[in-house]
Image: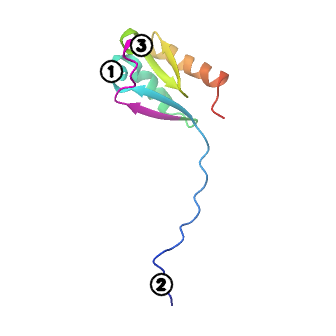
Amino acid sequence: MVFSLFKKKKAAQPQPFKNRVEFCITNLSLGSADAYDILMERDDIDIEESGCTSHCEICEQGIFAIVNGEIITAENAETLVQAIDEELKQNPLF
């Protein structure tokens, strides 16, 4: 029996592309956390948290998220989720 140090790994299943939504940690504490919680339950979205997204002026004015590179702002978490859904319909990743 021959033992190989270099075993071949099984081919991983290709992961489907997901839309990316990024939240600023500071903005989560300012009100976007409810939107974050709602979106975390969805399978079609990959959620990321950033320490700072370098959009401090937007962060000071209200809640926001970055959807596939586009900044989405809203007055409250409910309208933020609606705006994110609208952005994903108009400009999906795939």
Foreground residue, 12 or 85?
A: 12
- 23 displayed left or right of 83: left
Q: Check the image and name the residue furthest to the bottom.
A: 1
Sequence-wise, the earlier of marks 2 and 1 is 2
Q: Secondary structure at mark 1?
A: helix
The residues colored magenta run 46-58
Q: Check the image and name the residue furthest to the front.
A: 54
The type of residue carrying mark 2 is Phe
Residue 85, quarter of the rendered image: top right
The type of residue carrying mark 1 is Ser
Q: CA distance from mark 2 to mark 3?
A: 59 Å
Question: Residue 3 — which label?
Answer: 2
Q: CA distance from mark 1 to mark 3?
A: 14 Å
Q: Which residue is mark 1?
A: 29
User: Does residue 2 lie above or below 18 as drawn?
Assistant: below
Question: Residue 79 — which label?
Answer: none
Q: CA distance from mark 2 to mark 1?
A: 54 Å
The residue that appears at 48% across and 74% down in the rendered structure is 6
Instruction: State the scheme by which the image is colored.
Output: rainbow
Sequence-wise, the earlier of marks 2 and 3 is 2
Question: Residue 58 — which label?
Answer: 3
Q: Look at the image and say whether residue 47 sits in the magenta stretch.
A: yes
Q: Secondary structure at mark 2?
A: loop
The residue that appears at 53% across and 67% down in the rendered structure is 9
